[in-house]
Image: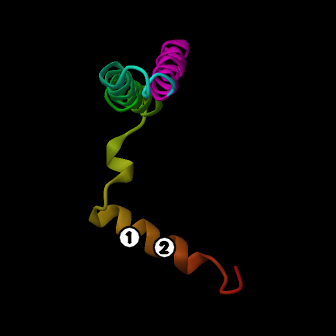
Amino acid sequence: MKYLILFIVIASFGSIIYGFNILEDQESLGHKCIGLGTAGIFLLAMPLFLFKASKGKKMKDYMLTEENIKKMKEEKAEKPENQ
């Protein structure tokens, strides 16, 4: 999964760079390459990375619930003021 994401990112950046290089000669193809590269990064690579990074984590730990607010207040009270 890690290498698939890396391949998509490298291919997308390559497509963007290629699109900027041929933009003066073939304007429509250049814009298509830039658009496909951008879409590859934001519609393929980023969701795959977020899925991989969040695997095995509990969403409840990141939500602001009454229980988590109490935990934060207790942790703040335990720390000395100079830290």
Dot 1 falls on a residue whose secondary structure is helix
Q: Is residue 61 left or right of residue 81?
A: left
Q: Secondary structure at mark 2?
A: helix
In terms of depth relative to the viewer, which is nearer, 79 or 7? 7
**Which residue bears the numbered disc 2?**
74
The residue that appears at 53% across and 71% down in the rendered structure is: 75
Q: Is residue 41 found left or right of 60 in the rendered image?
A: right
User: What residue is pinned by disc 1?
Assistant: 70
Tell me if label 1 and label 2 are in contact, CB under 8 Å. yes
Check residue 3 for magenta coloring: yes
Horizontal and vertical percent for residue 8?
A: 46, 17
Three-letter amino acid code of the residue under disc 1: Lys
Residue 55 magenta: no
| Residue 83: mark | none
Q: Residue furthest front?
A: 25
Q: Residue at x 45, y 75 (%)?
A: 73
The picture places residue 49, in percent across and down from the top left corner, at 44, 28
Q: Label 1 vs label 2: CA separation?
A: 6 Å
Q: Which residues are magenta?
A: 1-20
Main secondary structure type of the part rendered in magenta: helix
